[in-house]
Amino acid sequence: MFDENKLWRDRAGGRMKDLSRYLRYIFNGHLVIVLLFLIGTAAFYYQEWIKNLSTSFPAELVLAVILGLFVTYSPVYNFLLEADKVFLLPLEEKLKGYFLRSGFASIVLQGYILLMVFAVLMPMYAHVNGNGFGSFIPFFLILLLVKAWNLASAWKILFFVELSVQRWDFIVRYLINTIFAYLLFKEANLFILLAIGLIMVFYYYSFHVRTFKMGLKWDQLIEAEEKRMASFYRLANLFTDVPKLKDTVKRRKYLDFFISKIPFLQEKTYLYLFSRTFLRSSDYLGLFVRLTVIGAIGIYFISFGIGQLLLTILFLYLTGFQLLPLWNHHQNKLWVDLYPVPQQEKTASFHFLLMIILVIQTFIFAIFIMIKGEWFYSLLALGLGVVFSYVFVYSYSKSRLRK
């Protein structure tokens, strides 16, 4: 006898157990200290920025634009697996309770994220409007209700095969959410908000009627679930080996220029392999680009020199630490062990590549400081960055890799 309740409990429980196991690795290392430093620094600058805001600042519009994104993005965590398209497909009619529980779990988890974001933005709104935090709970409850509408609407859109329908749905819902949130924070007339609420109800009902006799698109549901878990596994893979992670590789022919500079010599075999892996793998190159962009923006907007130097060292550490898994990227490929190259050449190649990457990032940070006209701190950041990179690569990373 098929029991959908037991199936959901097993799937949700297994997923939570899987997530908690990897989260222990993520929050067990030095990253926690770094995150606390980042959060503390960001909170300090955010508080100082709020103090200098004038009453003419469009706080309502800023809140509406940002919260509109978090409210609109509303995936349903369905906990489906690849084999379900075969074994659960005949039982689709009996899975209504399963997906209803998945929707409830999704709104709880995403509602918590929405609460955190709203709590961060609320001091800005309270300062500009001078109303204090008395409206925080009513506003949040209304946003949570709108979140539930978005989640229900997004689920109905998944019954369509056409990707264009899903794209247009996201755009339309984002516009509705942003307008509604803006009028809510502006404390517009209640009848105007109710009118937009009726538009939301009609929007959902129109898709409910059109999809009433449609079946689930199992391929899309499973693919979306796998993509969400792959994002988490890529993060966890920075701290421990994740067997479930599937590598994503892109050709990136335009980056072959850098590979062509490596001499065609036997002792450069691992340097070529690591370099090619770094440039083609979305995990490593994407991580380097994201951290470099975020670090450069943060360094540019920090107004005092010591803060720029600290942020430079911090992002160099984050980049170097999260690129260490590149060392074990090919550990399960037997043909790599057949290379007639000594182990010390592999170690030297990895350290050389990591040093080059961190030095390039150091130069980028120094240039952004130089653009502000602060030559002294630019040269100081360059010198400290190179020294830190050398110590990190040839001292810290060696002990880390031995563990």
Image (cartoon, rainbow, N blue to C red):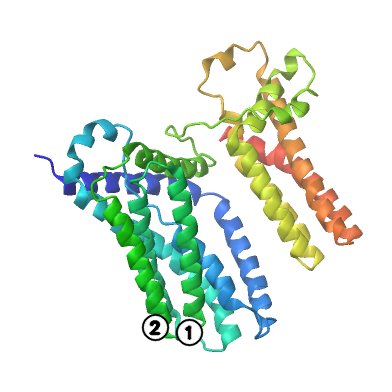
Please determine whether, in this image, residue 343 is positioned above or below residue 87.
Answer: above
Residue sitting at x 75%, y 37%: 355
Direction from residue 204 to residue 236 in the image, left or right: right
**Which class describes the residues within 10 Å of circle 2: few (<14), some (14-19), or many (20+)?**
few
Q: Which quadrant of the view contains residue 143?
A: bottom left
- What amino acid does circle 2 point to? Phe
- Which secondary structure lies at badge 2? helix
User: Mark 1 is on which residue type?
Assistant: Glu
Q: Toward the viewer: 283 or 34?
A: 283
Q: Secondary structure at mark 1?
A: loop
Position of 373 compared to 137: left or right?
A: right
Going 57% across and 52% down the picture, which residue do you hit? 31
**Nearest the eye: 203 or 240:** 203
Q: Give the mark count.
A: 2
- Residue at the left extreme of this rendering: 1
Q: Measure how far apart labels 2 and 1 are at the Cα level.
A: 11 Å
Image x and y of residue 256, in percent: 73, 26
Mark 2 or mark 1, whichever is nearer to me: 2
Q: Quarter of the image for the C terminus: give it.
A: top right
Q: Nearer the viewer, residue 211 or 256?
A: 211
Q: Is residue 201 visible?
A: yes
- Which disc, if any, is residue 187? 1
Residue annotated with mark 2: 191
Q: Is residue 283 left or right of residue 363?
A: left
Location of residue 130 in the rendering, given as x and y in whole percent from the top left corner: 56, 89
